[in-house]
Image (tube, grey):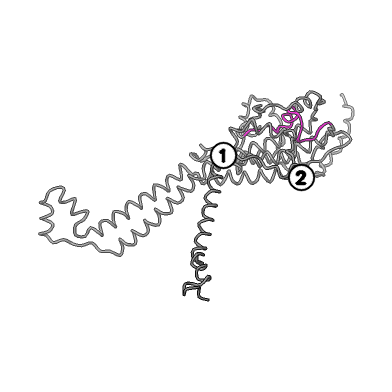
Amino acid sequence: MPGPGGGRSFRERLLGILPGWASIVAMLCQAIAVVVLLTIVVIISHHFGVLPLPPSTSNPTVTESKLPLQTEEYFLGGLKDDLPDQSDEWWLARADHRLIADAIFNCKEVTQFTSAYMPRPYFSALLLDLDPRGNHVFRNKLTVDPELAAREKAAPAFTLSSNDQDLLSLSDAIARSRLAAAEGAKTNFPWAQRLGLTTLIVAALATLFVTLQGRMKPIELSEEEQNAIGGAGLWARIRHILFGRGCGFRWVAFMAITLSITGTSLTGLRQVYDPTRTLTQNTRALLELRQLHQEIMLGVKCDPARKQIEASRRSTDWANAIRRIRANIIPDFGAFANLDFGGTAPRTDTPQNQTPPQDDGGPAPPREAATTDRAAPAASAPAPAAAPPAPPAGPTDNP
């Protein structure tokens, strides 16, 4: 409806005052951008301490639990400057040994505290204080809780039987051997990888250039060109050899000879320094040690009447296995020599390898029976019957 005097209507004047849809969308985007920017500024200020925010009190019923620290936390706190990566073998070896130590602790039926809160002398007696270097030390770098001090003061005497000590010693020897095997494998792995890839690349390039040399033909220079090159200066001759006519064949021949010599040298180097052999042996020994540790854990049995670990029938087999596997672990310098590993070399302290005594005319001492000798047959062949005794001689007739 037109306004009085032929002017604009009320609707037209209202539409002229209100912004359009495009303006509304633009203003909303600007408002959202301002809110996001302010939020980012507040978060960054709170992160750097410029604008600290008060703690949330929306759920006042949830309170922080103040549980005492476990003995394992005190031990790890003393090693916080020397703790290895989470993928290190030290964590796995200690975890396996801890299962055996917990089984021995639970067999003692200590009711004053659990294995997680055992006193530090108990912790060390069970050989749980193995550090990443293979030593046994409990460093105190954390403030000792009064409750822990009270438990240690009131703790009864912790006695280990001979079976307990043998099992702990065997498990600790396996754990330290695992650390040595893992360290040897980790040290030699990058060198074995580099040497193997270098040898492979050099051998492939040498084969390529030797094949190209057989396919190419040298360019024969005329007598005048040879005389001109021979009469030129030193730099001119070098420039002709490197970039002159027929330089492609010369470059291919040079690379074929150089790469062949390099490949042969690398092969000879592996005879003197072979990290792959050390890596393979240590990795195999590490896997066998892990398997042996698992077998020992599954073979632990408690004697409730005597409160000690039962002696396993396989203790001797486990001791021989750890001796054999530890002989397979090669140190870093073992890659520089062709060592005899695996315990196959004869020992010098056995009676079979000792120098026999000089023959002084007396009877030879009896030879000790070796462990590999076969048992004598149960029944031997009967001895031949003795000859019948001769009749007594009659009296002699004297003349």
Residue 151 found in image quarter: top right
Left or right of 219 on screen, residue 49? right
Residue 252 image position (x, y, % from top left): 29, 57
Span shown in magenta: 112-131
SS class, disc 2:
helix
Residue 118: within the magenta?
yes
Left or right of 103 on screen, residue 39? left
Task: Give me the residue at 45% from left, 45% from top.
Answer: 270
Q: Residues within 10 Å of mark 2 (few under 14, many from 20)?
A: few
Residue 342: within the magenta?
no
Label annotation for residue 298: 2
Left or right of 42 on screen, residue 55? right
**Which residue type carries mark 2?**
Leu
Label annotation for residue 51: 1
Q: How crowded is mark 1: few (under 14 residues within 10 Å), some or many (20 or more)?
A: few
Task: Give me the residue at 55% from left, 42% from top.
Answer: 186
Q: Which of marks 1 and 2 is nearer the N terminus?
A: 1
Label annotation for residue 154: none
- Disc 1 to disc 2, how far (Cα)? 57 Å
| Front position in the image: 294 or 220 | 294
| Front position in the image: 364 or 350 | 350
User: Is residue 7 placed above or below 29 in the rendered structure?
Assistant: below
Residue 5 image position (x, y, % from top left): 47, 73
Residue 136 image position (x, y, % from top left): 66, 29
| Front position in the image: 344 or 62 | 62
**Which residue type carries mark 1?**
Leu
Residue 276 image position (x, y, % from top left): 51, 46
Q: How many labels does the image show?
A: 2
Task: Give me the residue at 23% from left, 58% from top.
Answer: 247
Residue 170 found in image quarter: top right
* Quadrant of the snapshot with the C terminus: top right
